[in-house]
Amino acid sequence: MASQHITLKDMARILGLSPSTISRALKDHPDISNDTKKLVKAFAEKVNYRPNALALSLRRQRTNTIGLIIPEIVHHFFSSVISGIEDLAYGEGYNVIISQSNENYQREVVDTQSLIDHRVDGILVSVSKTTLNFDHLKSAIDNGIPMVFFDRVCDEIETDKVIVDDFDGAYTATSHLVERGSRRILHLSAPQNLLIGKKRQEGYLHALKMHNIQPDEKWIIKCDTRENVFKIRDKLIALAPHIDGIFTVNDSTAIAAMQVLQEAGYQIPGDIRVIGFGDGPNASIAYPPLSTVEQKGYEMGHEAMRLLLHRINNRGLEDEFVTKVLTPVLKPRKST
Amino acid sequence: MASQHITLKDMARILGLSPSTISRALKDHPDISNDTKKLVKAFAEKVNYRPNALALSLRRQRTNTIGLIIPEIVHHFFSSVISGIEDLAYGEGYNVIISQSNENYQREVVDTQSLIDHRVDGILVSVSKTTLNFDHLKSAIDNGIPMVFFDRVCDEIETDKVIVDDFDGAYTATSHLVERGSRRILHLSAPQNLLIGKKRQEGYLHALKMHNIQPDEKWIIKCDTRENVFKIRDKLIALAPHIDGIFTVNDSTAIAAMQVLQEAGYQIPGDIRVIGFGDGPNASIAYPPLSTVEQKGYEMGHEAMRLLLHRINNRGLEDEFVTKVLTPVLKPRKST
DNA sequence: ATGAAAGCGCTAACAG
DNA sequence: CTGTTAGCGCTTTCAT
């Protein structure tokens, strides 16, 4: 930070007025004469005066900044969430500080602390895959910072939440496979400590049950990234002759699985139907274009921000916490 | 921002000491007795005291925060750049505020101003496609804030820069097509006001020249996004019978072009070879996997941050500005 | 070894 | 209509 920045005091000295007069003139305080206002404003414009946001925040006891803790920026879903948040935030005069945890618990703790230190007015969180302890988030709430969870929520903290109906989405996706003719359906799942991993698996199991298909534990494999698919390639290929459908916990896992199976000589959807979860741009790039279930990132971000703003603007009120559930929509393409 | 945060003054009052003593005890000032230090530290720990970053910054005249202005977070290339920046930044105790311009000039101006207002210690910029005027960035420099450009640089501002050798990369990509047997090569290009658009086009032209191929203006089409490809679909299909190669300014444009051509019955690479620029994860997902030229995002971010830290830590010194050039590497896959 | 006071840049209650 | 003063939370001379 340089010393070049011109301050209110500087202007006061130069114009021979007091800092308070300058301050008031700049914000059209009724007490100030028109002449003075004009003079001050013209001068401020000329020297390109900008108030120091730090000083303002310290004074006002509010930063007009909200913090966002997000696992990974690269994923299209999370990028969409960010857009949904930012569009609303900027409209309301808020800045957004983005912290990506990189799915790393330690990083999440440090980032949360940093947001608290910077006195953000509120926090939006989607927890990392490796987060099992939530004290860092509780600490933010203890410090009086409103918090809203989205997507990857935490059950043991009571606050506003926005989620997609993962159970319903998984049920829809799995049922779609069955309706196309699959009966022996593999599920590539996320860790069960993540609510989304659990709910999606439950939706899968429920769909099987509803269609009188006996679930088989061996057909649930923990595998939720492209890299992991390549690691379990042999297992997958060994399983392939016995299955006719795969439901994966996300799109990139589905796409990698298609690639592995195609390389091993399987036709998709001819031999095996594949469906993902999320509907990022990868789904349409994949070959064949991937059937999936749409997860509305932008809307989720928008809704989470709306809830947060409500909390910030109504600190007194102790409304009950709400959980908003967004319903995913089936996007059938060529892979089923 | 709530009032729940405990302050140094609060602790002083409770412990019956002065704020200055608390401050010194906390940072192991030699003047303070061991007993007092222990007492203060234990208490601070117990009440979970955290210094107010705003007050600290105001006092110190440095925020330990750097600002990042980036066109769009969702692109893999830019996400990698962010990782490269953050990894170095956090190691050095800096926070990073990310502002995405969404390729929108107005947004870029506002974001830059906001970073200045927040007194960031330095700024890293990749300019938006719609930015033609650079006064907002000059204003940051005038305010004494060090700045480093990366990827999308601005010629008319003198400062440190990190770029990939776009000319060389385009030359390599185009030559690769020729070596595989293409002679009639289409180029889908980015706006020429972007240096990268210009350099990549020049590299393309130079490669043609070096291989004694007469360039044809009609074979250069301004088209640099997936969406645009679908808009010019008819034009592309009309051109298709006359060409045997395409070099695009980025990967997603290349992938979309392959999809349009395949739908129209063309074989890739049989009828037309296609090569992109960038090497994001899309390249391996595409069908066929896309040949491209690798753009090292992580290294670029790392290098830009390194240069910026150097400027921040050597404010006095007026070293000459450097431009670091990274050389892209050919990644041949199945599309050529 | 500890405290009082000033100041980073700004605003607002209080005076005139 | 304008100025003085105090204070947001912290550090750092300068006293004692």
Image (cartoon, coloured by chain):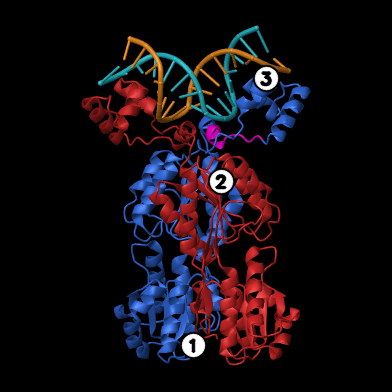
Chain colours: A blue, B red, C cyan, D orange
Q: Which residue carries the number 1 mark?
A: A269
- Check residue A107 for magenta coloring: no
Query: For residue B45, which numbered disc appears in the image?
Result: none
Q: Earlier in the sequence, mark 1 or mark 2?
A: 2
Disc 1 and disc 3: Cα gap in Å?
78 Å
Is the same chain shared between marks 1 and 3? yes
Q: Would residue A321 be seen by someone viewing this image from the given angle? A: no
Residue A35 in the image, given as x and y percentages of width and height: 78, 23
Q: Which residue is drawn at 36% across and 58% down?
A: A104
Asked whether, in this view, residue A327 is left or right of residue A156, the answer is: right
Q: Earlier in the sequence, mark 1 or mark 3?
A: 3
Chain of the residue under label 1: A
Q: What element carries label 3?
A: loop
Q: Nearer the viewer, residue A244 or B13?
A: B13
- Going by the numbered disc 2, the residue's amino acid type is Asn
Q: Which residue carries the number 3 mark?
A: A17
Q: Which residue is drawn at 61% across and 53% down?
A: A87
Disc 1 and disc 2: Cα gap in Å?
46 Å
Asked whether, in this view, residue A201 is left or right of residue A1, the answer is: left
| Neighbour tally class for label 2: few under 14, some 14-19, many 20 plus, Cα within 10 Å | many
Q: Which residue carries the number 2 mark?
A: A95
The magenta segment is A49-57
Chain of the residue under label 2: A
- Going by the numbered disc 3, the residue's amino acid type is Leu
Residue A200: quarter of image: bottom left
Q: What element carries label 1?
A: loop
Disc 2 and disc 3: Cα gap in Å?
33 Å
Image height check: is A66 above or below A150? above
Residue A299: quarter of image: bottom right
